[in-house]
Amino acid sequence: MERVEKFLKDADVYYLATMEGDQPRVRPFGTAHIFEGKLYIQTGKVKEVYKQLKENPKAEICACIKDQWLRVSGELIEDDRREARQSMLDDYPSLQSMYSADDGNTAVFYFQNATAVFSSFQAEPEIIKF
């Protein structure tokens, strides 16, 4: 899982896909954080992505670095504990100008039943489950 987090951080931006009814929705994200042995992302409760994940937690992210890419699929489960929110914000100080652990808006989700696939045109895919 640490390798997945490192790839996402090195990529700087990844794309998160969710569902809104029967329509896929994709948007750029930038947070990836390990807390208590789980891979977390962060968003705001006022955003459509939050509502989509609450309705259907199945999601997939994709990131690329040069000729390699990573896809992570699974369920994103909200962790509403203050400690989880604060840990994310501590790892991303730039978010603290927009979010705080106690603002009622900050939301963190962790991957459950996740499959990460590292791919490139030069090698066979490598699969990691967590």
Image (cartoon, helix red, strand yellow):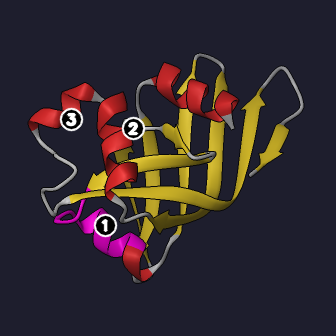
Cα–Cα span, label 1 and label 3: 17 Å
Mark with earlier residue (2, 3): 2
According to the picture, the residue beneath numbered tag 2 turns out to be: 31
Q: Position of residue 130 (x, y in %)?
A: 74, 52
User: Residue 13 at x, y = what percent?
Assistant: 41, 31
Residue occupying the far top of the picture: 66
Circles 2 and 3 in contact, beta carbons < 8 Å:
yes
Res. 1 image quadrant: top right
* Mark 2 residue type: Thr
- Left or right: residue 9 compared with residue 46: right
Out of 36 and 40, give the one closest to the viewer. Answer: 36
Question: Is residue 48 found inside the magenta-colored segment of the image?
Answer: yes
Q: Secondary structure at mark 3?
A: helix
Residue for point 24% across, 27% down: 93
Name the foreground residue: 18 vs 74: 74
Residue 77 horizontal/vertical position (percent):
50, 67
Mark 1: give few (<14), some (14-19) or many (20+) Cα within 10 Å.
many
Which numbered disc flags the more N-terminal residue, 1 or 3? Answer: 1
Q: Magenta segment, which residues?
A: 44-53
Q: Count the marks.
A: 3
Q: Amino acid at mark 3?
A: Leu
Residue drawn at x 63%, y 48% as measured from the top left: 72
Residue drawn where x is 22% and y is 50% of the image: 101
- Residue 6 in the figure: left or right of residue 13: right
Q: What residue sits right under mark 1 in the picture?
A: 50
Q: Which residue is mark 3?
A: 95
**Disc 2 from disc 3: Cα separation:** 10 Å
